[in-house]
Image (spheres, rainbow, N blue to C red):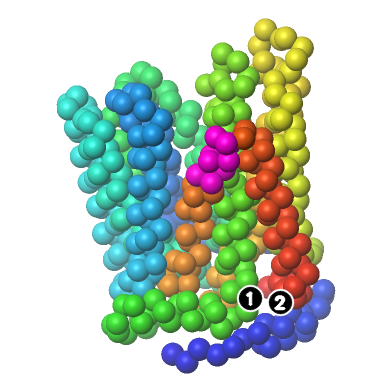
Amino acid sequence: MAIRDTDAADAGVANSAAAKDRPAPSSIFSALAAPPYRRFWLGSLASVGATQLLIIGQGVLVFDLSQSEFLLGLAGAVTGIATIVVTLFGGVVADRVNKRGLLILTSLIVAALLFLLGSIDSADVVEVWHVVVIASLIGIVTGFDYPARLSIFPLLIGQRSQMMSAVALNSILWQGTRIVMPAFGGFAIAFIGTYSVFYAGSAGFFTMFLVLLTINLDEGERSPARNVLRQLAGGFQYIGANRLFAVLIPFTYFNHFFGLSYLQLIPVFSDDYGRQDDQALGFLLMSAGIGAVLGTIMTGKLRASFPAGRVILVCSGITSLVVLTFAVWTHFGPDPIGLANPMISPMFFGSALLIMIAAVFNSIFLVASMTILQLRVPPELRGRVMGIHSMTFSFIAVGGLFAGGLAQLVNASFAVGLSAVVLLATVLFVTGTQPVVRRLQSE
């Protein structure tokens, strides 16, 4: 496929779209009207919930076995690193093979790995290296799963106008389960054991496997089986030749690396609120999840009322300012009032409110920007391009590693504040130098 510079075309689209042509608000649930997408979304509800259970159970199990913060971080890091490395090639594979068949295979493999982990845990023979190895294997499989998942759901909807709904519903999957599953997982671990969440996670991915078997999908022409590295280079070449993609994808990386790194440090802040740090941690994480869901619901109306470029830039800018405010707020530490229960203090609820507001605007940014990319990426390059974009989510953990290093050297509030300042500078730079984003109209 010939790759051409599309800057002029993007500018033409941006300039020619008038306010009267902006899309009317549509229901956030409109994509569920398409039966294939509805089944896919419900199956994904089970598998994404299972992923959240894995994160919870893996952390608890490793720390119970080792009492080591380093090994706890290692178990999470190997999954993220494996996913980043494999995702690049996973995008090529998603363009070359049947996406539905690939997701069937990845769902079944992860279900089997989680069942294996649950079995050795329930038999009380599990060791830390078992968890690390299985986490690494799941990370490798996820590297193939993510690009296929992001590139298949646009094929499941009936109309182009349902794209924003499909992207928003996909976001709700992740954010909604992030609210519910920690409570469910904590209850199951406390009363049954960590093996229970691994078995439940296995059941979730097996449910996704069964749902995929019921979906018939015409995926059209697939990318020919050429050299893998050459095809991967083709994806990067398209992004480099298309100014909007070349700016928006790295901008999304920066947004998550610097704008969401504070989430990795929430356990540090929750510990400042006294002996109820476990409850504080759960409440602060829940605040982030609630904010993300609210932001996702608001996205449709905002994109219908304002140009997409303005929504993307303003929301990322507000996110950085709110996170900076959170850093300043937490710098003063717990309330000096001396309350018996620090969780009822104004300082604690102020922290939770700021986290929720930041999550609202970051969610709007993510859904709006991903919708634009999904609408504009050529179908034959969708797996590669969206696979490269999907590394966005792994940059949260990498950003947490950066912020954690700064927190170790100075303190957590300084690390979060500096990250917010860098993100704000990035927003101002993109706003001032990249008119292809600034003039971007809603579609």
Kindly check if marks 1 and 2 are in contact, taking CB atoms under 8 A apart as contact: yes
Task: In the displayed orientation, state which residue is furthest to the front.
Answer: 409
Which residue is nearer to you in this view: 247 or 42?
247
Disc 2 secondary structure class: helix
Name the dominant secondary structure of the magenta segment: helix
Span colored in magenta = 401-409
Along the line of sight, which residue is nearer the eye, 435 or 225?
Answer: 435
* In this rendering, position of residue 127 left or right of residue 2: left
Left or right placement of residue 333 versus residue 198 in this view: right
Q: Residue under label 2, please give it.
A: 436
| Disc 2 packing (10 Å; few <14; some 14–19; many ≥20) | many
Q: Does residue 85 sit above or below 441 in this rendering?
A: above
Q: Mark 1 points at which residue?
A: 244
Dividing the picture into quadrants, the one containing residue 23 is bottom right
Residue 435 percent across, percent down from the top left: 75, 76
> Is 285 drawn above or below residue 208 in the view shown?
above
Residue positioned most to the top: 340
Around disc 1, counting alpha carbons within 10 Å, would you say few (fewer than 14), some (14 to 19), or many (20 or more)? Answer: many
Q: In which quarter of the image is the C terminus?
A: bottom right
Amino acid under disc 1:
Leu
SS under mark 1: helix
